[in-house]
Amino acid sequence: MVATSQPLNRIRIVLCQTSHPGNIGAAARAMKTMGIHTLYLVAPKKFPHAEATAMSSGADDVLQDAYVVNDLEEALQGVKLAVGLSARRRELTQPYLDVREVAHEMMHVAEQADVAFVFGTEMSGLSNLEIHQCQLLSFIDASPDYSSLNLAQAVQVLCHELRQASISRSPPKLYTKDLTLLANHDSLMGFLSHLKVVLEAVEFLDKVQGDRLMQRLHILFARSHLEIDEVNILRGILTHIQKKLKV
């Protein structure tokens, strides 16, 4: 991979419901030192804020250009893939990659399309709902004796790995096909919403613990790396079912 600034410009760092404005500023500083500038803030508790500006230590331009949105779905509009950063494994979850491996894979995707890395709140991390909007999960391999990382520290580790991956020449393992064929996040979420409507119409979700089933379906289709044509075929099937049911 040729080292350019362009793929780094396609990386979004998304912070969800951040409580402390100082963490936002420190995260912006961590990003800028590694050449990453696109910051999305999902319903921050306090922003803009003087403490955020102070902690940014000269990265106030990242704060000024930050996108403040109401929910994660809005923050992920237009991305090809979304990666959730989680400190713990979930009972039902997407495939996990360590932060170095996921950085390498996503820098390949960022050659052609936008990619998002999603961080949860300082206290509880990502919610299950937020997790299910991400196609992959990643973790930072910290010491098992003391694995606690501040939010901005976690952002710094990720951004460092992304910068190192931007100059790597090793081929990716997962995303080797034409990425223009891969369905983006919006298409996948649209299909899953459509699927839920149809399953509710045939009363399937009520019979098999609906929420848990939808979690499994999110995971199944997230790891399938569906192409655009495949999503269109599946949605065509769902539409035909709806017509037959007259719903």
Image (cartoon, rainbow, N blue to C red):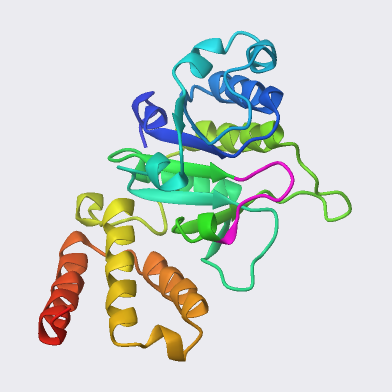
Seen from the viewer's position, the closer of residues 35 and 2 is 35
Where is residue 24 shown, x and y percent of the image? 63, 26
Seen from the viewer's position, the closer of residues 160 and 130 is 130
The residue positioned farthest toward the right in the image shown:
145
Q: Main secondary structure of the magenta part?
A: loop
Is 36 situated left or right of 178 in this image?
A: right
Kindly indicate the quadrant of the structure image that contains residue 21: top right
Q: Give the quarter of the figure containing the N terminus.
A: top left
Where is residue 123 shown, x and y percent of the image? 74, 45
Above or below: residue 197 compared with residue 131: below
| Residue drawn at (13%, 82%) of the image | 246
Where is residue 156 shown, x and y percent of the image? 64, 31
Q: Is residue 190 magenta?
A: no
Where is residue 50 shown, x and y percent of the image? 66, 12
Q: Is residue 127 magenta?
A: yes
Q: Give the quarter of the figure containing the C terminus.
A: bottom left
The residue positioned farthest toward the bottom in the image shown:
207
The residue positioned farthest toward the front in the image shown:
247
Does any portion of residue 184 appear in the rendered image? no
Does any portion of residue 113 appear in the rendered image? yes
Counting the numbered discs, the total is: 0
Seen from the viewer's position, the closer of residues 82 and 54 is 54
| Residue drawn at (20%, 56%) of the image | 181
| Residue drawn at (53%, 33%) of the image | 164
Which stretch is magenta? Answer: 120-128
| Residue drawn at (16%, 86%) of the image | 245
